[in-house]
């Protein structure tokens, strides 16, 4: 991502802000409790590598807001393949020690 002037363009700036607004400035992975200060806007279908101008992938329905953890989880590596097979899963605990997995028994009891 760094190095591509597209990500410094006002086009991307506006589109990214729209995506964040649509998603309520929160990670879109269900059950994710990560605080909102480190958000990434991810392309669901990867945009053409190296394209410096707007492409058909640069539209609001193809964008989703992710926290830093989830962005890293599916980020394309040097091979162009996504991490974790592109699967977004919730792991670990929040700051209070509560498991983030919505299927964890602690989260089934209805707090
Ligand atoms: Zn997340």
Image (cartoon, rainbow, N blue to C red):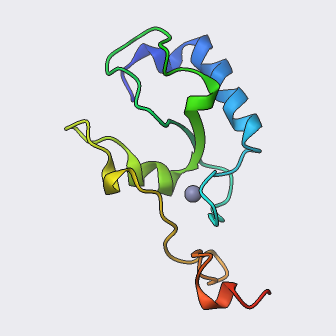
The image shows residue 72, relative to residue 20, as above or below, that is below
Ligand 1, image quadrant it occupies = bottom right
Quadrant location of the N terminus? Answer: top left
Q: Quadrant of residue 32?
A: bottom right
Pick whichever, 70 or 29, lies toward us.
Answer: 29
- Residue at 49% in and 57% down: 69
Q: Tell me if 66 is positioned left or right of 36 in this view.
A: left
Check the image and name the residue furthest to the top.
Answer: 53
Q: Tell me if 74 is positioned left or right of 26 in this view.
A: left
| Coordinates of residue 110 in the picture (x, y in percent) | 79, 86
The image shows residue 59, relative to residue 28, as above or below, that is above
Pick whichever, 63 or 4, lies toward us.
Answer: 63
- Residue at 40% in and 31% down: 46
- Residue at 55% in and 30% down: 62
Quadrant location of the C terminus? Answer: bottom right
Count of numbered circles on the image: 0
Pick whichever, 39 or 81, lies toward us.
Answer: 81
| Coordinates of residue 95 in the picture (x, y in percent) | 64, 76
| Coordinates of residue 103 in the picture (x, y in percent) | 59, 80
Q: Tell me if 19 is positioned left or right of 50 in this view.
A: right
- Residue at 39% in and 49% down: 74
The image shows residue 108, relative to residue 76, as above or below, that is below
| Coordinates of residue 85 in the picture (x, y in percent) | 32, 53
């Amino acid at each position: 991502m760094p190095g591509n002037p597209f990500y410094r363009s006002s086009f991307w700036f506006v589109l990214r802000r729209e995506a964040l607004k649509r998603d309520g400035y929160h990670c879109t992975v269900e059950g994710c409790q990560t605080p909102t200060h480190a958000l990434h806007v991810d392309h669901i279908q990867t945009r053409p590598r190296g394209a410096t101008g707007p492409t058909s992938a640069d539209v609001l329905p193809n964008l989703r807001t992710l926290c830093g953890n989830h962005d890293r989880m599916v980020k394309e590596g040097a091979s162009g393949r996504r991490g974790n097979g592109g699967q977004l899963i919730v792991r670990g605990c929040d700051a209070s020690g509560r498991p983030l997995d919505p299927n964890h028994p602690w989260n089934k009891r209805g707090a």
